Image (tube, rainbow, N blue to C red):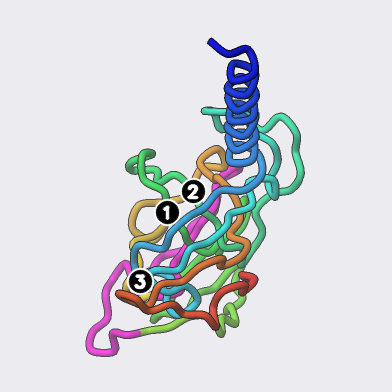
């Protein structure tokens, strides 16, 4: 084998290896891509939005565990978070934080109260005005335990969230939704106006 060609191959292999290590590091500790598959966060997030999720916002975790080794911060009220669904950790969900540890969350006729105060939620949409669902629209007070978070979708009448399956454990939270980097509105349709939107 030609020594020069051998050297070139070696350089390419080394460069590829370094690129893979960097990509793995970035995905594990810094950012991760996420695609919106459902309408549970309408109108804030559209089906077909592609997001970058900041994994560093809530601290550095040991890979493949939920243990935080370098604390940075904790999820706060109104943060949009991506997390492993407690009912099936192989699935990632995205919702908005409504209650943090120590809060008391209650729902009365679709209105959400935290610690007795009604929330002002301009990002929420309601689509079902024909009937009242007992759990969806009226929920007795729940105190959020330590290291757990109560989350809801912005599309309140079409979201499978903490009202139905309970709180999200802290170790299940993957990161904070940060920016829309791409958005498909359908076949061959790009929502250019959404690209670059910072999420709040």
Q: Is residue 83 left or right of residue 26?
A: left
Q: Determine which quarter of the picture holds residue 198.
A: bottom right
Mark 1: secondary structure = strand
Q: Earlier in the sequence, mark 3 or mark 2?
A: 3
Relative image position of residue 72 (x, y in whole percent): 76, 44
Of the 4 image quadrants, the one containing the C terminus is bottom right
Can you identify the residue that label 2 sits on?
Answer: 83
Q: Determine which quarter of the picture holds residue 6.
A: top right
In the image, residue 3 sits, relative to residue 200, either above or below, namely above
Can you identify the residue that label 1 sits on?
Answer: 93
Mark 2: secondary structure = strand
Please name the residue shown 37% across and 77% down the image.
Answer: 185
**Circles 1, 2 touching at the beta carbon (< 8 Å):** yes
> Callout 2: few (<14), some (14-19), or many (20+) C-alpha neighbours within 10 Å?
many
In the image, residue 132 sits, relative to residue 64, either above or below, namely below
Can you identify the residue that label 3 sits on?
Answer: 39
Please name the residue shown 54% across and 73% down the image.
Answer: 113
Q: Is residue 137 left or right of residue 195?
A: left
Magenta-drawn segment:
127-155
Q: Earlier in the sequence, mark 1 or mark 3?
A: 3
- Is 135 part of what is drawn in magenta? yes
Q: Earlier in the sequence, mark 1 or mark 2?
A: 2
């Amino acid at each position: 084998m030609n020594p020069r060609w051998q050297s070139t191959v070696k350089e390419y292999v080394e460069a590829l290896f370094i690129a893979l290590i960097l990509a793995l590091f970035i995905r594990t500790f810094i950012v991760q891509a996420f695609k919106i598959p459902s309408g549970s966060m309408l109108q804030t997030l559209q089906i077909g939005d592609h997001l970058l999720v900041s994994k560093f916002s809530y601290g550095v975790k040991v890979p493949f565990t939920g243990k935080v080794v370098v604390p940075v911060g904790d999820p706060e009220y109104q943060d949009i978070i991506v997390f492993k669904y407690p009912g099936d950790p192989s699935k990632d969900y995205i919702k908005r934080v409504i209650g943090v540890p120590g809060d008391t969350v209650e729902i009365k006729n679709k209105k959400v109260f935290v610690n007795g105060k009604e929330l002002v939620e301009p990002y929420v949409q309601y689509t079902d005005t024909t009937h009242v669902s007992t759990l969806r629209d009226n929920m007795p007070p729940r105190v959020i335990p330590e290291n757990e978070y109560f989350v809801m979708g912005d599309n309140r009448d079409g979201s499978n969230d903490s009202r139905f399956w309970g709180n999200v454990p802290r170790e299940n939270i993957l990161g904070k939704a940060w920016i829309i980097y791409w958005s498909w509105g359908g076949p061959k349709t790009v929502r250019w106006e959404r690209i670059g939107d910072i999420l709040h």
